[in-house]
Image: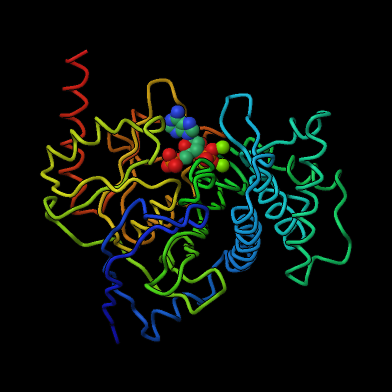
Amino acid sequence: MATFTVSTGTINSFSPLKNKKPLFSLSICFTLKTSKSTLRGATASMSYDKELAVAKNAVSLAARLCQKVQKALLQADVQSKSDKSPVTVADYGSQAVVSVVLQKELDSASFSLVAEEDSGDLRKEEGKETLQRIMKLVNETLASDGTYGNAPFSEEDVLAAIDSGRSEGGPSGQHWVLDPIDGTKGFLRGDQYAIALGLLDEGKVVLGVLACPNLPLSQEKVGCLFYAQVGGGTYMQSLDSSTPIKVHVTDLDNPEEASFFESFEAAHSLHDLSSLIAKKLGVKAPPVRIDSQAKYGALSRGDGAIYLRFPHKGYREKIWDHAAGYLVVAEAGGVVSDAAGNPLDFSKGRYLDLHEGIIVTNQKLMPALLKAVKESLNEKASSL
Ligand SMILES: Nc1ncnc2c1ncn2[C@@H]1O[C@H](COP(=O)(O)O)[C@@H](OP(=O)(O)O)[C@H]1O
Ligand SMILES: [Mg+2]
Ligand SMILES: [Mg+2]
Ligand SMILES: [Mg+2]
């Protein structure tokens, strides 16, 4: 078996809007296995092969739409949702594109999609212009693929495609789980974001596809597509379909050498708490703060060893923020759990029921991480 270790040296986040100093730089060193057996693993006949091929196409097309919008982002394209979080024409457009492609290619009678956005605001008078922009983007993107461009989608078609994401999910049957843009705040800053698509079968995540258009693939190339099928490992390729390579989480066992990821946004995760946990573990490197499930993708290829996510009290995590990323990391040999070490349960509907937060690392580091998390949470509770 030929195993090459490719050191990509220092890679920087890509900021197309700002075109200035990178927000993080991170040394990555990951092992690319290009043996025949590894590549055969990517194409072996497994039960979700057709779904995987369609999901990769859907997510790549959605990424094309998002990249176009991020390049030419207009303030008018950004709205505020009722919970005050931002949403853009690209979030809606990406959701419509993925929904259309999945329904066209797969059995639409049993189709179920749990997705973040809905068309409520677009159906209001003030949403009319935004809807026009989304319709244009969706039609341009679908036409660019050559497969779906024959009959343009009307405003009603686009609204219906977005609203097909209203499923409640649950423990039985198959449900697609979509975050059309995860990390919208990062997307708006010109930083990291992801298009994240998972498939649940009987309550378990069986497919995960993660497009990270601004994540470096190598020193020369930016834009990664991670994908995993349950039992089949995790693969990474460029967004324009280069040969996939198998990726693995780091095999580091010394926390002192580990680096850790957390949300860029302090409002999304308690930075003080992660810093306390990291200190207890003996982690020396400063936190790597990036938006979105790009953190799961980066961790799955060994860029960093730990991801810590501790939302402020009262926040409920949604399944689309973790389903795809979870499988990408799990199939790359990583462990994802809540702060008490329980596995994540995606079978409960649109939300995840969690004890405190989400922690991710490899199998060797998990016992020490759990201990540090427990001690830190106790310390925090007793200081209140
Ligand atoms: N107060 C909060 N605490 C934790 N997560 C939050 C939050 N407000 C929003 N989020 C979630 O954090 C996601 C982004 O994750 P990250 O912090 O890793 O970049 C958002 O996804 P969207 O951008 O899809 O809305 C949103 O679901
Ligand atoms: Mg999200
Ligand atoms: Mg989103
Ligand atoms: Mg959102």
Residue 108: x %, y % from top left: 77, 54
Q: Is residue 25 above or below residue 160?
A: below
Quarter of image, res 300: bottom left
**Quarter of the picture holding the C terminus:** top left
**Image quadrant of ligand 4?**
top right
Where is residue 229? Give x, y as percent.
49, 62
Would residue 319 be visible to someone looking at this image? no
Q: Nearer the viewer, residue 319 or 265?
A: 265
Relative height, residue 152 to residue 201 (above, below): below
For the residue pair 13 and 83, the one nearer the viewer reads as: 13
Left or right relative to 131: residue 198:
left
> Which one is nearer the viewer's eye here, 355 or 120?
120
Determine if residue 258 is in view.
yes
- Front-lying residue, 218 or 46: 218
Q: Position of residue 169 (x, y in %)?
A: 61, 39
Residue 55: name its quadrant.
Answer: bottom right
Residue depicted at x 26% and y 49%: 306
Q: Identify whether 248 is placed above or below 98.
A: below
